[in-house]
Image (cartoon, grey):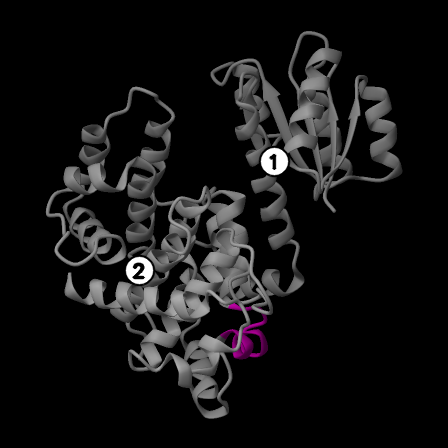
Amino acid sequence: MPRVIAVHSDVQELETWRRTLLEQRRGWDVELFSSVGAAWMRFTESPPDLVVAPMTVALDGRVLLSQVRDLAPQVARVLVAGGVCDERAIEGQRIAQRVLPDDVEPMDFVETLAQILKQRELIESPQLRAVLGRVGQLPAAPEVHARLVKRLRDPNATLHEMAGLVAEDAALSTQVLRLANSAYFGRGQAVTSLEGAAGRLGTRLLTSVVLAAEAYGRFGPVAKGFSIEQFQQHASLVARIASALEPRAAFTDDAFTAGLLHDVGRLVIASQLPAEYTIIEQRAAKEGLPHYVVERDVVGCDHAVLGAALLGQWGLSSTVLEAVQRHHAVSFAGDLTLDATTAVAIADRLARDVERFSPGTTASNPAAVAAGDPRWPWWRELAEQLAMDGMAV
């Protein structure tokens, strides 16, 4: 259970933090203090996973967070500042992992803490650290996606403006349209313009497609035998299935995004560790084992964890990170409760079934019928239809 220490000299503001954190994240152990002294004493007794402090006249959180950094640098730090352009806030960026404005929306506040905690959990894995040491520096966040995310914060942003940002890069525009048509639009529904894609997808899904398009092109040469076309086709199908299992559910956008990016860790291995990728492919084929099992033996961690670490570095939501990290770790026994993680895991399994087995062979495919949930045959039919629609675009 993640432990969070939050300190604020304004008791009313501290109570707001308490309600926000406890209502949104009941699984967290949250301790709140109105004085730095009490918070520091508790910190020295038992360092938490994350410390949140404000920057006000009465309490300069930079001092506390700098002490936290010096004593226990592994503890995550968040500074809530009075203004994002304040010089002190800019200085705070050298002390804290994240600086938030004091008028941050409650949901954004909690999501920011969740992202930081998730990234901390991933990076602290000794196996992942060893792999990252061999891979070297992971790519920085894609630029156009970062600009779109920044533009989305403006409530007056228009679809025309969003499409215009993408259109500035001709090669990216082509890739976005190709990916949008394969990943979202069905038979006879293809779009031919970025503005048309933006209008049909909406700003959030357009941003996800742009991120995927940039991510796919962000790595250098890949190992022999790795097909980027097949990789994209599979990711697109998983995204479509994951977002169609329960179309009106709140998690569908996150499931779509995670579906597009769930295997990005495989791309990291294929491009950064080509010799290991070849060994993984050979052993998986020879021994009949899933790739992620062989990856853990050959590389030290699987592509799901590696992909989540990369996306965490890029600032994606904790929900997307969880779905990417756990898409091979979901149990299919019994009736399933759908959320983004479960939807992506189901979609990945269904997509691989459809890619391996001929349409109409559900009954002879153990992977499609042995899971127990009565919706599985319907999900299989849905996956087959979406796969055929995708091939027709």
Secondary element at image label 1? helix
Q: Is residue 60 above or below residue 267?
A: above
| Mark closer to the observer (1, 2) | 2
Indicate the position of residue 378 as horizontal and vertical percent values: 39, 66
Pick the front one: 226 or 32: 32
Residue 74 at x, y percent in the picture: 70, 44
Task: Using residue 365 as the reference point, say whether residue 296 is left or right of it.
Answer: right
55 vs 243: above or below: above
Number of callouts? 2
- Secondary structure mostly taken by the magenta-highlighted segment of the chain: helix
**Which residue lies at the image location 60% right of the left edge and 47% below the top edge?**
118
Give yes or no for residue 315 being in the magenta stretch. no
Q: Is residue 62 visible from the viewing direction of this image? A: no
Q: What residue span does the magenta drawing correspond to?
A: 292-302
Specify the amino acid type for callout 2.
Ser
Left of 127 or right of it: where is 14?
Answer: right
Q: CA distance from mark 1 to mark 2?
A: 30 Å
Instruction: Quadrant for residue 40, please give it.
Output: top right
Nearest the eye: 338 or 296: 338
Residue 132 percent location from the top left of the image: 54, 61
- Per the image, label 2 sits on a secondary structure element best described as helix
Looking at the image, which residue sits at the far top?
57
What x and y, as percent, mark residue 11? 75, 12
The residue carrying mark 2 is: 236
In the rendered image, which quarter is residue 248 located in? top left
Query: Taking 74 as reference, is 301 left or right?
Result: left
Pick whichever, 92 or 169, lies toward us.
169
At label 1, the amino acid type is Leu
Q: Residue at x 54, y 45 (%)?
A: 318
Q: Residue furthest front?
A: 374
Q: Which residue is mark 1?
A: 113
Seen as rendered, the residue at the extreme bottom is: 286
